[in-house]
Amino acid sequence: MNVAVIGASGYVGAELIGLLAQHDKVSISHLVVSENSTSNGSLFSELFARWQGICDVPLQSFSKDWFNTVSETLDAVFFATPHEFSAQWAQAFVDKGVNVYDLSGGFRLKNTADYPTYYGFEHQYPQAVANAKYGLAEWFPADFTSTKLVAVPGCYPTASLLSLKPITAAGLHQNNGLIVVNGVSGVSGAGRKASLATSFNEVSLRPYNILQHRHQPEISQEAGTQVIFNPHLAPYKRGLLTTVTLNLKKGVTTEQVNEAFVNAYQEQPLVRIKATWPQIDDVAHTPFADIHWQYDEKKQVLVVTTAIDNLLKGAASQAVQCMNATLGLPTHYGLVPQLQGAIA
């Protein structure tokens, strides 16, 4: 695929470009930054030195002229941009026949009335929202071949839904029961732009946006049930962990819970069911999600913890999984070299 990445100078964009540069089915033709970016004209490897010799593509600024010149030469475009930007431009690429993988929140919520509340803008493309497919790679790979627009989930929803969906899909949860998701993320989730709120000298472990975080409706929408989401910021660079607590229906057994998780993930090599509680150090800089659960049959309480790298499984590597599914490849293709021989 001949691809472009828009938002190439951010943390997620950089991780995505690194993965695409090493993918043998991809040719990176354009790396794009915002119109006023000071990085315009620099090589990508000058901005992120670890990719020197691997990806030395120059950065270009986005403009209408750039779009008009190159859009018809592309097979796919990845948006690692602010939400409103992708919401404004994604449909234009779709109209040119380009596959769009949007890593922002521009198309994740199906109710367009929610965008002013949770994202701060009125969505101008309700039909694009309706046509977009949600990019939770382990659950919906067949959907990605039937759309030109994939809304790649956020990092918190990815970890939360990998924990929840085996249970809700099997109908094991109590209807209208309380479901609480507690999440903790490193500061890279806030992006690369300097901010006092995410400075290491200022950050302490703390909750934020309780009962009003934009990921709460996204998690509830895709889990098929209402959840309470409590995000926390922690003073470390990368990695994310969620712990979900919920009541199951009367009579649900440990064996049924185990069967739900095994059925969901036994054929998914990037999701690892762990014998002990997962930790961020085991998934940082990898595309894996590690999951462990414990169930108290007497209290009917299930606790599930999932750990991921917020920049990879929570963003860049999941976008590659979605692209792989579009190409008819196993979703983990090119992401785990040790498995490449088995794929080939």
Image (cartoon, rainbow, N blue to C red):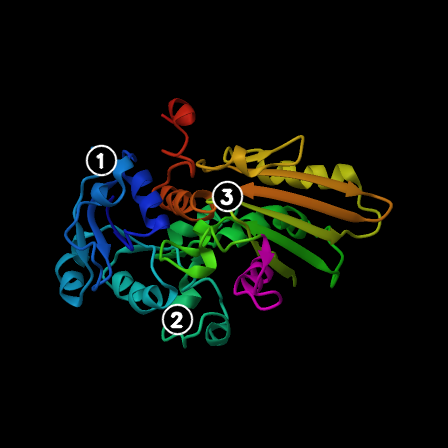
Q: Earlier in the sequence, mark 1 or mark 3?
A: 1
Name the one closer to the observer, 109 or 304.
Answer: 304
Report the residue marked by disc 3: 239
Q: Residue at x 29, y 55 (%)?
A: 7
Among the 4 quarters of the image, the one containing residue 101: bottom left
Q: Give percent across and percent down for residue 155.
A: 49, 51
Q: Amino acid at mark 1?
A: Gln
Mark 2 burial class by Cα count in 10 Å: few <14, some 14-19, many 20+: few
Q: Magenta region: which residues?
A: 205-222
Q: Residue at x 46, y 45 (%)?
A: 237
Mark 3 burial class by Cα count in 10 Å: few <14, some 14-19, many 20+: many
Report the residue marked by disc 2: 127
Q: Residue at x 37, y 43 (%)?
A: 320
* Label disc, if present, on residue 52 of the rendered structure: 1
Name the one closer to the observer, 214 or 319.
Answer: 214
Q: Amino acid at mark 3?
A: Gly
Q: Amino acid at mark 2?
A: Gln
Distance of mark 2 from mark 1, alpha carbons?
41 Å
Q: Give percent across and percent down for residue 103.
A: 39, 55
Query: Residue extending furthest right?
Result: 298
* Label disc, if present, on residue 296 of the rendered structure: none
Q: Is residue 242 left or right of residue 237?
A: right
Q: Give percent across and percent down for residue 300.
A: 81, 49
Q: Mark 3 and mark 1 in contact (Cβ < 8 Å)?
A: no
Q: Residue at x 74, y 47 (%)?
A: 302
